[in-house]
Image (cartoon, coloured by chain):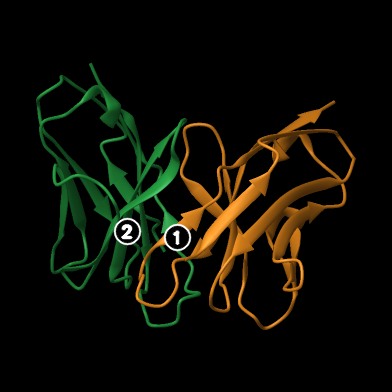
Amino acid sequence: KAGVTQTPRYLIKTRGQQVTLSCSPISGHRSVSWYQQTPGQGLQFLFEYFSETQRNKGNFPGRFSGRQFSNSRSEMNVSTLELGDSALYLCASSYGTANMNTEAFFGQGTRLTVV
Amino acid sequence: AQSVTQLGSHVSVSEGALVLLRCNYSSSVPPYLFWYVQYPNQGLQLLLKYTSAATLVKGINGFEAEFKKSETSFHLTKPSAHMSDAAEYFCAVSGGSGNTGKLIFGQGTTLQVKP
């Protein structure tokens, strides 16, 4: 079974631009969560999508948004990029059932650098 | 609200020595706990998870963790360290009821293995 695939692996953008990151979950998984990882703040939850609906959201500004398609693939978008948005963005997929111990499987991440 | 504290941001052991990485959690409900490992420029790989079925949980690569409710701890151990164990380790707790798809991570512990 193929794992979680994130594209692209690396991105360099300029302040003020916008960026879109993609995540393809494991086949059969309907939940996709996104995380931002930085040296200072660690791993922080951005949002979770399940069956094309945002089910949960972390404490990030509105510049961070996402969506999920009918095939469970997900995209996240960051508009008006700031230097502080430089981070490793990780996506995780799971079955997303009511059983809270369903483990999440992570992709390799997208390394975003804002210059 | 759920939270996780990892004691020690950096742990150094000799090859063949015992590995002990500490994790304490705070949860208002029975927690679901996880240990993940991250190698440089990679995503997170699940080592093991606590499902409430057994307090001693065995994972991959010879790691295990013991859930101790009285101490609110879920420490990760491995009897004999290998050079390939050098990585960053994260303890995480599920976000709890109404907080779907969210993992709350500790700040991480970098494990160094000396030859």
Seen at 15% across and 50% down, the residue is A65
Picture colour for chain B: orange
In the figure, A110 relative to B95: above or below?
above
Q: Are marks 1 and 2 in contact (CB under 8 Å)?
A: yes
Q: Position of residue B64 (x, y in %)?
A: 75, 61
Quarter of the figure with the N terminus of chain A: bottom left
Chain that the image shows in green: A
Q: Which residue is mark 2?
A: A33
In the figure, B56 relative to B75: above or below?
below
Seen at 10% across and 24% down, the residue is A16
Mark 1 Cα shell of 10 Å, populated few (<14), some (14-19), many (≥20): many
Q: Quadrant of residue B32?
A: bottom right
Q: Which residue is mark 1?
A: B103
State the SS at label 1: strand
State the SS at label 2: strand
Q: Residue type at mark 1: give it.
A: Leu
Q: Position of residue A82 (x, y in %)?
A: 20, 26
Depth check: give the residue in front, A80 or B46: A80
**Label 1 to label 2, Cα distance in Å?**
9 Å
Mark nearest the camera among 1 and 2 is 1
